[in-house]
Image (cartoon, helix red, strand yellow):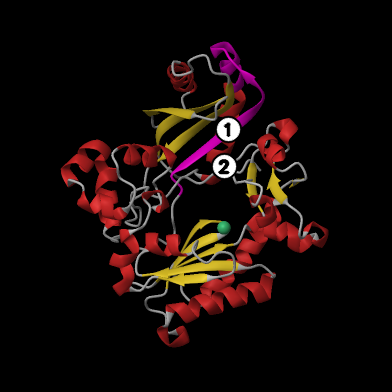
Amino acid sequence: MQKIIHVDMDCFYAAVEMRDFPELQGKPIAVGGRSDRRGVISTCNYEARKFGVRSAMASGYALKLCPDLILVPGRMQVYKDVSRQIRAVFERYTDLIEPLSLDEAYLDVTESDHCQGSATLMAKAIREEIFAETGLTASAGIAPVKFLAKIASDLNKPNGQYLVRPDQIDEFVKTLPLIKIPGVGKVTAKKLTDLGLNTCADIQAYPQNKLLERFGKFGAILIERAKGIDNRAISPNRERKSVGVETTLAKDIHTLEQCRAVIPQLIQELGVRVNRSAKDRVIHKQVVKLKFEDFKQTTIEHRSDEISVNLFYQLLEQAMERQHDRGIRLLGVSVGLASDSRADSHEGTEPPQMDLGF
Ligand SMILES: [Mg+2]
């Protein structure tokens, strides 16, 4: 049985800002892009959450919910530096660290003999050391498998931890809402609810072949998760699966011509980023993404082993067929990267990382 700790900093970017600018403490704040530039909230503090402000929300809308919201621009370099300090704490306990983002990581402490091998005590010690060294609080989830550790880290937030013991797994998953399972987004959750499926117990009782028919590979994952099974190992060098560039337009645009005009600059920037961070990797697909005025988004992709400008224009045309008279607020291009031969890649069941727009 593995011992996995999922450590997650509490409203990380906002917490760093409150630490460095104490005058912000006790006030509703959010780190994100300005509303007059159609920015999006990346993190907000608990005071802002009381008003319903959430990450990934348009800043303009957040300001409507909470007119006194203080919008702070991000300081990515500072967050990265703090992230390195946190990582250094993890490394005292294990080498098996899988970062999910700057403020979140899985640790496999199965073989670690700190704290007499107690993962609970290790999680506590890690959180204390992080606080002592950064002045920031973290929450942790401790479980025998990754997805349960991740869910557990949310249960005693902020500044708390939660343990799911091996003998508690069955009881724990029974009432677990499916939306809590990493990889189940709003769209999938809606499809499941439409079938009358809300909890893991519902999935356990539902015919497996129907789930597989309806959800394919993800259906198989759901069946496993609903039983508390997650065979994914910690992969210390989680590889990048894509490189992309996107732009939120200053004003909604409506025509294919207008979209085409935005593409060259995106492709140029994409080329720069691929050279910088994925030079030695094999490209295997190209993707175009559109986000419409109602915040729904669509992506179109096609196999490709290079960055083809013409293919991006073709994909854009296809994506525009889904426009249905809606204005377009965001346009993005990306390339998918093939897994290299290392055996540590696994299916992409984690939710995609959010582009914070820094
Ligand atoms: Mg966090």
Which dot marks residue 96?
none
User: Helix, strand, or loop for circle 2?
Assistant: loop
Span colored in magenta: 240-262
Query: In 3D space, how far apart are the residues under numbered discs 2 and 1 (Cα atoms)?
Result: 9 Å
In the image, is residue 178 part of the stretch drawn in magenta?
A: no
The amino acid type of the residue labelled 2 equals Asp
Residue, far bottom: 116
Residue name at image x 52 percent, y 14 percent: 325
Where 26 falls versus 283 (above or below)?
A: below
Quadrant hosting residue 186? top left
Q: Is residue 277 above or below residue 265?
A: below
Mark 2 or mark 1: which comes first in sequence? 1
- Tag on residue 246? 1
Ligand 1's image quarter is bottom right
**Res. 77 image quadrant:** bottom right
The amino acid sitting under disc 1 is: Glu
Q: Determine if the C-beta at disc 2 is less than 8 A from ligand 1.
A: no
Quarter of the rendering containing residue 255: top right
**Marks 2,1: beta carbons within 8 A:** yes
Residue 150 location (% of width, % of height): 44, 61
In this rendering, is residue 74 above or below 316?
A: below
Check residue 355 in the rendering and tell me which mark sits there, or answer none.
2
In reply to whether residue 255 is colored magenta, the answer given is yes
